[in-house]
Amino acid sequence: MANQDEIRIFASVVDRGGFAGAAKALDVTRSAVSRRIDRLEKRLGVRLLDRTTRRVTLTEAGEALYQRGVRILADIAEAELVASEYGGAPQGVLKVTSPIIIGLNKLIPVLPEFLGLHPQIKLQLDLSDDAMDSTLPNHDVAIRWDMQQSSALIIARLMTSRQIICAAPGYLRRHGTPKTPQELSGHNCLLMNRLGLAHNEWTFRSAGGPIAVRVSGNFVVNGGHGNYQAVIGGLGIGRVVDLRAVEDLKRGRLRRILREFEPEEATPIYAAYKRGRLVPPKVRSFITFLRARFRALDTESGHGDE
């Protein structure tokens, strides 16, 4: 069987139109090239080249070896390029998928810092709330809420998120601030409608255990973005994901209320990547960065409280 060096020399003879051209390109003697081709032909038991004093031409067997050999050499070069990403500086295209709310509110804001640290990485972000394929066929990293364990993936916990109760300062000035969950009955509470069902029962923590409070209001919407904009606009009191509200709480556009009654449970957010003996530096550096930055962001969710 021909080895990689012999195929490379043979392809060079064909590409350069003869032994002399190949010898010059490979920086070896003409006789060395001739010996390697002779050895290759002897081992394969076929003639690969018809030689004349002016040129060499391919035989039928030589044509077959050349066509396949060139593809093999290209595949080897590509494989070496891919393998090189596992060592040295993080580099290459990093394909990431994330739920829309996490991507817009937490991931994109920290990407300038990450890409500034790793200028040889090009990040491709897919924002989607679709279910994730556990084999990650199209992505290097997936960020998701409350992820199931998978033998095909390594899962790293990044931070947590929770539902919080908020209202715009203007609404609270007009209608007052509820001090207990039960006082929500006297307020306009904004409702989410999913699959035809209005989620009008909010759960809170109390000394005697969890309590469910039925709320009502004059506005129902079928998406989190619409719900959030209604809260910001002062339409009423709403239950929102803390990730979305951090900046508006800091700036005073929202006030967090009834915090002492919030359920203790929080929803974890994870990053998943393919299991393997070697993790590409681009993936390893991204996960390390996210764990550090998202832990810091996790502490920011308390800003802007009343």
Image: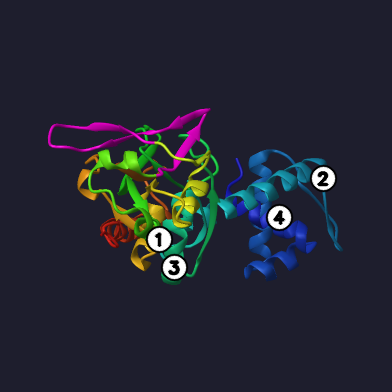
The tag earlier along the polypeptide, 3 or 4, is: 4
Q: CA distance from mark 2 to mark 4?
A: 13 Å
Up-down relation of residue 169 to residue 70 (above or below): below
Foreground mark, 3 or 4, reads: 3
Tag 4 residue: 11
The tag earlier along the polypeptide, 1 or 2, is: 2
Tag 1 residue: 170
| Amino acid type, mark 2 | Thr
Horizontal relation, residue 156 to residue 227: left or right: left
| Amino acid type, mark 3 | His
The residue depicted at 26 percent of the width and 41 percent of the height is: 181
Please report contact status of discs 3 and 4: CB closer than 8 Å, yes or no: no
Tag 2 residue: 59
In this view, the residue in front, 43 or 14, is 14
* Mark 2 crowdedness (10 Å alpha carbons): few <14, some 14-19, many ≥20: some
* Helix, strand or loop under label 4: helix
The tag earlier along the polypeptide, 3 or 1, is: 3
The stretch in magenta equals 188-215
* Magenta-span inclusion, residue 130: no
